[in-house]
Image (cartoon, coloured by chain):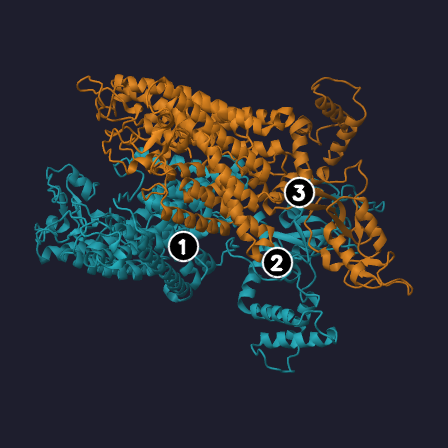
Chain colours: A orange, B cyan
């Protein structure tokens, strides 16, 4: 479908340009692209292959097909499966962290995403198929898991299936089974025990095996961009590799900021209400700008392949039109170290334009309402930048081989620099800058290219890229999109470094109404119903009695509702004033009271608890590692409050915004005036602290101002109370 | 030192055979092994290179050097650093799970292990250097971490450094940085957050980079066994690959059983008291048997390299002496598909003998009191088996290329089967069978060999090997050694599938004396001292009061002791009848009582608690994920007991031994007679259960015997009580 934009194969419509010409009689190597069966649109409609008329005809047909594909894709997504848009990886990350998005992994999403992915890639938009393939694989995993009750009934088990599915998805997308497992481990999955590692490994194995049996590239190889370089790399080359890493990190940081601010504008302004128009517009601009430049016109995967490939004697690409060293003629030369010819200069200009074009278009494309992956565009940008640097290095080494830098290892006429390797390193660096992956990225790239020898350069570039990117913002593109969309995702990577305690985060807060609790044996059905109706909590702690607030267990709202309904329908003698009890044995009741209702079976007798003095650092750690949704807070065995995942996320957000200076002030002063320091005892220093903390909160650090009263001071006093100063 | 067993380089003592002959003038390829500078011992001492006398002389010197090296190694280990023996991986796993072995990662262990590792490998014993290198790397990590207080003061942080160090160790041992990271993740580390993944990655990167800069193999390659195969593999070949996987699994299971039972005998009999003698004996037998067979005489790494390498036209190895197909003469042939010549037959016989020899010797060698790794011997065994299978397949394909199996893809004279690939797959399978690694193993092997194309065969063989091995016993060799040595290690891989509750595992048990607890404000110093002296627990729960046993916190024995000592020394007025309090404010005391002692600062206010109804499945999960050492058990906020890691390990052992039939009986009957089933109410069915469970416990299943009274019945009743039947 991609080649349909340029022409059509007369012998068989469904062949692309290359396949069409396989059966051709034209066996000359240089002419392998041209064969009578393949007709460009101009040839077919105007009957002529050359000339400005045919160029315009081809141009027009290119835009026509691009717009058709893009329109079809966005309409299908909009009408049938709104969840099929985007890469899906942020949502899968959120789902794997325990959140449920109904229908996100359903059969409609699967079908529509599969179809529209083909259309979107064929439309020539600056997007890739790899991310969406992970989503497609997860849909398959989810649908298959419904066949087995063991998996469909247990959310945790289902998440393990999804982890394995995303490994299989990457395994198929890149032909990189081990990279897929690591991608699932590093980027997608939240909780990844060794058991899941083995299962993902097996899933990726089967995926790779089936892929190889189908043999989609016709060369018995799994990988998309197999390359073979013939020269080792030299220590000095680490400098350009690290520079490429810096470029990748900068590009990643810039892309994330630009893309997120564009997506935020789309969400907040009227513009976002016309997704079809937006896709058409972006596709039109892409097609109009892309056609004149051969490097943007061609399929992005093919572009990457060309950039990765080293110039050999058989290479007919413009990038390899070096001047022959021997006789000065402008013929193709197989001499390894080459002065650049006019073809190379032209190619470099076109590559620079392509680089700018790709950078701009990718920012506006990622986030459109069509399936859109980010791997291929990022890699293309890196590969273009890398190839340019590589050619520059090569020419530098050719013209200045007597520099002390080159002297030792680069003799005249020797093949010392491989521009394709630079492209590969650049691609890894840019992808690393955007996604902030490390290990999995290196493994994917070296599975993708077979470049085992070049693992140290790859690692150096990817680490640099991550560091540079992290300096401008800790989030990768997927985390940024999760935050943009407000999904309840507790990032496992970010360290919690604050010093707050569980009691400061738990609900109810001081000003809130008391927590809705149930007592274990002295509620009536009516009272229970009342609690359920008045509140909207998902569950209720059960305590011994109002007097002794000791915690017994936790009951889910859903279970209580169902149990009450069942009791009304089935059990006779249950009235509104029937006693409800969660204990083992029924409480002793007056003789005339109605039959009590036993609800012990719905009581979770082992709710997760922490004490109010537990540092939030530990609470966050527990939530992450055990995948909790809520946790009860007790003090000396007495029920105090509850912390949910949402509370923690709110707390983190609060800390980020305005509480940080407060905490910093408190720490600073605690250190400066330790409790034992004040000779005059507590009261004096307390006032001092309160003042200082308040001034910190107002941003008036260091000023002595006695007018800070009211709410702020109260909070400071509470903070000081809590810290035992 | 390894080549010193065979001869000596006259021009420079420290050159090995190959390096010695590099500078030689003998440039003929076939004669590259022979050069005047290199003298075998017979040449040097007797002055003749050929004949039975010189053979015996060489034989004698070979044994002499082997014994000298082995003796030196075992003496150094015994005298200076007993911890330097073995591979060290079981102990590092235990240390990373939270246990502390003092001195195990110290500077003496580092020095002695480095020296003796060289000696042990040079002595020709059937052991490798890869496992011990992980130990050496961890020693370095541990010593470096003492330079930074952030790491030396925090055990958890130090463990992260050790995880990264073990990745670096494997990275250096195999030249496989990514494999190293995965090895650390899959095999060594207990808790491996993403942060550690990145740091390990960086450590492995630097290790690989430094290794490459040193360039130890003189070929600018990181890897030990770089191979290049020229033919793809075919679907049908998966059958022999899977068979190799089965062989690997069987060998692994057999090796683990045999080795563990031998090590147990060594531990329990007098034989284990003479480690030096044992090493000498094993070294002598190894040397005597190894010398006559060229495949056992040479260095094991070189053997593996030779077995992995495909026969090319330049290969002078005996394994490649095929009969030339063209003219029938017995010359070397570069024809790809070859009938075997006499050299190949001889080689196969020698390989079979070498296989048997390696299998037997490795069982007795692993566990000796010298540094000994298992990777290289296991890989050698697999490589030998694989090469034999490979040659068999090759001959089969040659003589029966018209079989329907070969017909489609193996034409006459075509090179369809690569015996070296079989050796590689076999090596991976055997290593997988012994260690039960999967992903990391595949990555290591393909980093080791550069065989990216062969990832599916490798994965298939490794998975098969793991399944077959697991069928005979779930433990890998390292877990087996951990259990043999009785280290407190809670395996994170094994699933806990039993249905016991926390209250069944916690201490005190029903028959035990009550738990030693402290009350928060009515103990005297004397009483506290008494509790400390009478018990040997590491810590004590603190409760509100004897009447209301609500849990307040947890105080460590060590902290209490130190606090009491400090108080006696520094604080005046602290007498034996001084009140001790853990509360915020001092309790109100009679006027004449001595000054109370505040111990709030040593109270852990956020001890980890679970309720008594928590299933052990969840408790074990919490222990593993949070790395706990103990956990308090409460019921409705009231302190009931404590569960330590040791209790859990004991419980697991109990379940394995005799409780399983009990649990099974209970489950079976609960299912068969659900609570609602008995029409006659509870009493009848309870008796029935008790009887049945008791008969299960006695192994008299199904018999109806009314004499089972006493303790067993009591336990059954308790079990039924606990299950709400």
> Whole-Å distance between the Cαs marked 2 and 3?
40 Å
Marks 1,3: beta carbons within 8 A: no
Which chain contains the residue that carries disc 3?
A: B
Alpha carbons under labels 1 and 3: distance apart: 59 Å
What residue does disc 1 label?
Answer: B463
The quadrant holding residue B602 is top right
Q: Chain of mark 1?
A: B
Viewer-nearest residue: B106 or A707: A707
Q: In the rendered view, tell whether residue B194 sits above or below residue B84.
A: above
Q: Are marks 1 and 2 on the same chain?
A: yes
Residue beneath label 3, please?
B566
Measured from the top left, where is residue A297 in percent x and y? Answer: 40, 26
Q: Quadrant of the C terminus of chain B?
A: bottom right
Determine the secondary structure under disc 2.
Answer: helix
Instruction: Give coordinates of residue A664: x percent, y percent.
Output: 66, 27
Which of the marked residues, 1 or 3, is nearer the chain's N terminus?
A: 1
In this rendering, the label closer to the viewer, 1 or 2: 1
Question: Which of the two labelled residues, at mark 1 and mark 2, occupies the earlier sequence position?
Answer: 1
Chain letter for mark 2, please: B
The structure residue drawn at horizontal position 79% and vertical position 29%, both measured from the top left corner, is A714
Q: Nearer the viewer, residue B475 or B88?
A: B475
Residue that label 2 marks: B616
Q: Is residue A14 above or below residue B439?
A: above
Q: Nearer the viewer, mark 1 or mark 3?
A: 1
Q: Which residue is at 49% across, 22% downward?
A: A285
Is label 1 on the same chain as label 3? yes
Instruction: State how far apart marks 1 and 2 are (Cα).
Output: 30 Å
């Amino acid at each position: 479908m991609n080649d349909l934009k340029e022409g059509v194969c007369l012998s068989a419509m469904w062949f692309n340009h290359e396949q069409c010409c396989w059966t051709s009689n034209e066996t000359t190597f240089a002419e392998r692209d041209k064969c009578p069966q393949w007709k460009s649109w101009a040839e077919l409609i105007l009957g002529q292959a050359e000339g400005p008329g045919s160029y315009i005809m081809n141009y027009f047909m290119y835009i026509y097909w691009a717009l058709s594909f893009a329109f079809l894709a966005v309409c299908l997504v909009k009408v049938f499966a709104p969840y099929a848009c985007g890469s899906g990886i942020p949502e899968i990350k959120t789902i794997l962290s325990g959140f449920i998005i109904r229908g996100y992994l359903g059969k409609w999403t699967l079908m529509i995403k599969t179809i529209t992915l083909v259309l979107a890639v064929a439309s020539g938009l600056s997007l890739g198929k790899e991310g969406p393939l992970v989503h497609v694989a997860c849909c398959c995993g989810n649908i298959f898991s419904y066949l087995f009750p063991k998996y469909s009934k247990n959310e945790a088990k289902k998440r393990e299936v999804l982890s394995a599915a995303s490994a299989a998805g990457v395994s198929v997308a890149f032909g990189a089974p081990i990279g897929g497992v690591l991608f699932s481990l590093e980027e997608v999955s939240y909780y990844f025990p060794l058991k899941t590692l083995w299962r993902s490994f097996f899933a990726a194995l089967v995926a790779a095996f089936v892929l190889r049996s189908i043999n989609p590239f016709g060369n018995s190889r799994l990988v998309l961009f197999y390359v073979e370089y013939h020269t080792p790399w030299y220590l000095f080359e680490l400098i350009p590799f690290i520079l490429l890493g810096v470029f990748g990190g900068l590009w990643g940081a810039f892309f994330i900021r630009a893309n997120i601010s564009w997506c935020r504008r789309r969400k907040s302004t009227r513009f976002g209400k016309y997704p079809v128009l937006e896709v058409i517009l972006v596709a039109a601009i892409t097609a109009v700008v892309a056609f004149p430049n051969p490097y943007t016109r061609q399929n992005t995967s093919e572009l990457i392949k060309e950039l990765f490939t080293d110039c050999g004697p058989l290479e007919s690409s413009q990038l390899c039109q070096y001047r022959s060293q021997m006789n000065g003629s402008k013929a193709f030369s197989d001499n390894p170290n080459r002065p650049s010819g006019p073809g190379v200069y032209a190619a470099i200009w076109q590559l620079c334009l392509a680089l700018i074009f790709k950078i701009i278009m990718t920012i506006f494309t990622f986030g459109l309402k069509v399936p859109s992956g980010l791997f291929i565009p990022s890699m293309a940008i890196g590969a273009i930048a890398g190839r340019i640097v590589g050619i520059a290095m090569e020419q530098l080494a050719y013209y200045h081989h007597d520099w002390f830098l080159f002297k030792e290892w680069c003799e005249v006429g020797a093949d010392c620099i491989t521009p394709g390797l630079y492209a590969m390193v650049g691609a890894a660096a840019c992808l690393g800058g955007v996604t902030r992956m490390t290990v999995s990225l290196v493994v994917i790239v070296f599975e993708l290219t077979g470049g085992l020898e070049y693992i140290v350069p790859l690692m150096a570039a990817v680490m640099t890229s991550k560091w540079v990117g992290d300096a401008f913002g800790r989030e990768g593109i997927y985390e940024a999109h999760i935050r943009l969309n407000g999904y309840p995702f507790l990032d496992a990577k970010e360290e919690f470094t604050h010093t707050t305690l569980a009691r400061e985060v738990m609900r109810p807060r001081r000003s809130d109404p008391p927590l809705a609790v149930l007592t274990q044996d002295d509620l009536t059905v009516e009272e229970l119903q009342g609690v359920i109706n008045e509140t909207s909590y998902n569950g209720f702690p059960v305590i011994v009695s109002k007097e002794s607030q000791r915690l017994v267990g936790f009951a889910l709202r859903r279970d209580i509702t169902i149990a009450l309904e069942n009791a009304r329908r089935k059990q006779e003698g249950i009235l509104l004033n029937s006693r409800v009890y969660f204990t083992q044995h029924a409480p002793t009741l007056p003789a005339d009271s109605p039959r009590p209702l036993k609800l012990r079976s719905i009581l979770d007798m082992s709710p997760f608890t922490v004490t109010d003095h537990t540092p939030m650092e530990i609470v966050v750690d527990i939530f992450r590692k055990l995948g909790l949704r809520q946790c009860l807070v007790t003090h000396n065995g007495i029920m105090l409050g509850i912390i949910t995942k949402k509370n923690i996320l709110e707390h983190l957000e609060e800390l980020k915004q305005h509480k940080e200076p407060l905490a910093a002030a408190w720490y600073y002063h605690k250190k400066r005036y330790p409790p034992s320091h004040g000779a005059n005892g507590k009261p004096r220093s307390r006032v001092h602290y309160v003042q200082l903390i308040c001034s910190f909160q107002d941003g008036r650090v260091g000023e002595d101002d006695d007018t800070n009263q009211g709410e702020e001071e109260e909070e400071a006093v509470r903070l000081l109370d809590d810290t035992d100063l």
